[in-house]
Image (cartoon, rainbow, N blue to C red):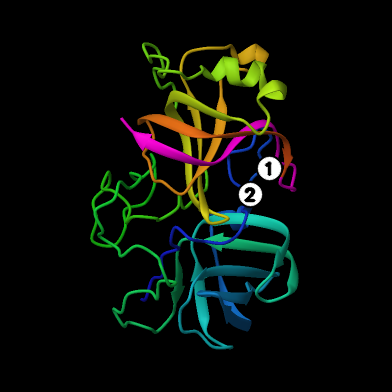
Amino acid sequence: MKRFFLPLCLACLTQFAIAQNEPAPSGDENGFTGKVLETMTTAGYTYVLVNTGTHTNWAAATQFEVKVGDTVTVGPGSPMANYHSKSLNRDFDLVYFTGTITVAGNDAAAAPTLPAGHPAIGADQSSPTLPPGHPALPGAQSGQSLPPGHPSITGKSVAPNLDVSGIKKAKDGKTVQEIVDARKKLTGKPVVVRGKVVKYNAGIMGKNWLHIRDGSGKDEKSNNDLTVTTTNMVNLGDVVLVKGNVSIDKDFGAGYRYSVIIEDAAVTVE
């Protein structure tokens, strides 16, 4: 079987657990198999319309060879409702963006085609580890790192009960609580904050998304957690220094709204 891995630069917004209101899981986000009714390739990615025998689903992954009539198995992925592809100039009611698609009968061992500018697999970069319960990659043992830029297969990489005590406030910086509480005054302004990565998803809309906490604030006041987007890569549990501008009241659609977020930040692992 030939497997194709979704890289860091997936240019789409998927429904994943960076939001405070996560969608209820559907059975198909755990994967499905069927015959290809339609396929198209654009911007380094291949879309397939799959007939499972009971219904049809669109799925997308890194560019690969497939034709109408092929049987494919779509690995666990993240559903994106009402998705508009700019490169295709087409609207999709629902697309499953997945880490792997297997084409039946294709035993070639060629590597997936990476979009221009994508870091080479095996490059010397920090990479996320396999989340708990994630099936081992081909030739890999449980606990090994995913290739650089490989997103969470489930889209729900959460490190439970991470200890965020003892994190020192950054020099000339602010705490998570201070940023959340003063978000209106800080809108559009640069901030520096140190925190621990408690939630992480890579390769969403061309960015990596993380939640950080530093022990400040409280759950009941919703001021102890801060969402950050960046092109830098981190791991769950890393202590990071974040530098970026504050945005408020951001609405990315599909129910994902943020009262405060730091976008396009420079993130350094300490």
Q: Quadrant of residue 109?
A: bottom left
Q: Is residue 126 on the magenta stretch?
A: no
Mark in the foreground, 1 or 2: 2
Rendered view: 123 above or below 244: below
Could you say which is closer to the camera, residue 161 or residue 232? 232
Q: Is residue 258 on the magenta stretch?
A: yes
Could you say which is closer to the camera, residue 116 or residue 190? 190
Main structural element of the magenta stretch: helix, strand or loop? Answer: strand
- Magenta segment: 252-270
Relative image position of residue 235 (x, y in whole percent): 36, 39
Tell whether 172 sits left or right of 80: left
Q: Considering the image in quadrants, where does the N terminus appear?
A: bottom left
First in sequence, mark 1 or 2: give its number.
Answer: 2
Rendered view: 89 above or below 235: below
Could you say which is closer to the camera, residue 88 or residue 179? 179
Tell whether 181 sits left or right of 203: right
The residue under the point 30% across, 46% down is 126
Residue marked by disc 2:
15
The residue under the point 65% across, 70% down is 58
Secondary structure beneath dot 2 equals: loop
Is residue 235 visible in this depiction of the protein? yes
Is residue 158 visible in this depiction of the protein? no
Badge 2 amino acid: Gln
